[in-house]
Image: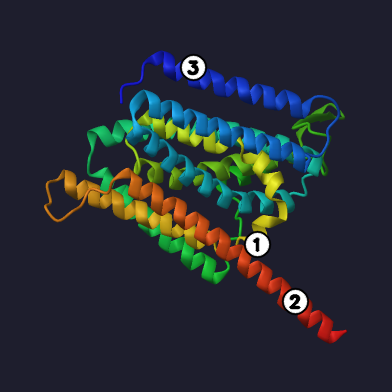
Amino acid sequence: MSVPAWAWIAVIGGLLVVLAVDLWIVDRGEAREFSMRQAGYWVTFYVVLAAAFGVMLWTTYGGDKAGEFFAGYITEYSLSIDNLFVFFIIMGRFAVPRAYQHKVLLVGIVLALVMRGIFIALGAAALQRFSWLFYVFGAFLIYTAVNIVRDHLRGKEEEVNENILLRWVRGAFPTTEGYVGSKVTVKIDGKRMVTPMLIVMVAIGSTDLLFALDSIPAIFGLTKDPFIVFTANAFALMGLRQLYFLLGGLLQRLVYISYGLAFILGFIGVKLVMEALHASHVSWAPEIPIWVSLTVIGATMVITTVASLVKARIDTRKGEAAHSEQV
């Protein structure tokens, strides 16, 4: 669809205003923990905002474009929930005080928005020139899906290895032993030093960059429109830090979420390959409509979430029964 420049400016400007208000409300006064009620309000607000944007697309550009947005938004939001597992590990590994965790997440999300914006622009331009990239994206998503299942079976999905950028920051800058409030740098005895706060922000930001390598090809498998790709990513990321505090320990109970995400990525990968073959006039290759994609993605997330919660309840009952027998 043809989106005028003013629409891009309005959407980006509106998102920046919302982020600024969010930051001002949370960070005013003394540092404090993000309450469950506060997180719940903000998550609800961002979900309603995304739904309203989708309805606006429906009334302006029709149901197909709105369907592409909702399919992309749900996919990106689902991938973001999976990313929260890694964020929990990073926060624990660097022992980030809970009162400052929301600031770390905010910086990571802003960096993710910038990096994904760059990836989206590059990806859209490349796909217009080189149609064969659809085969590459499709194969990459299928490969990623297989690796997710393989790592989950081996118990490797909770491992976080330091990347090159993080190791370089550690080695290049003198670091204080502990946190100094929420400061990222501090002057000690006339010498400028970085704090662990900067290190963990680099860890979150660079991890977001790796996540974008999966999410951008996935959403291009649902829509080729750069405006929808960007807005779906932006709305999915907006409430991510509040979702981090809202879900809390619930994330540990979503044991089947990785399988659901692997299935979604595999489905989108196959969809990309089929659409590329269809565009190449291969007669047997079907063109999968957006409503099918939306149904598959939504149903997969509901099924894996319910199955995870049921298993968690069964495991809890077994643990209580075993404890009572020992007593």
**What amino acid type is highlighted by mark number 1?**
Arg
Q: Earlier in the sequence, mark 2 or mark 3?
A: 3
Say which label, 1 or 2, has the lower sequence index.
1
Left or right of 316 on screen, residue 14: left
Quarter of the image containing the C terminus?
Answer: bottom right
**Residue 288 percent coordinates (x, y):** 27, 49
Instruction: Pinpoint residue 157: horizontal percent, then vertical percent.
Output: 56, 61
What is the C-alpha distance between the residues marked 3 and 1?
A: 39 Å
Identify the residue at image location x=48%, y=44%.
Answer: 74
- Looking at the rendered structure, the kind of residue marked 3 is Ala
Residue 289 visible in the displayed image: yes
Report which residue position mark 3 lands on. Answer: 10
| Disc 3 to disc 1: CB gap under 8 Å | no
Query: Relative to residue 139, is residue 180 depicted above or below?
Result: above
Front in this rendered view, residue 82 or 75 = 75
- Binning the other alpha carbons within 10 Å of mark 1 as few (below 14), some (14 to 19) or many (20 upward) gives some
Q: CA distance from mark 1 to mark 2?
A: 14 Å
Q: Which residue is mark 2?
A: 319
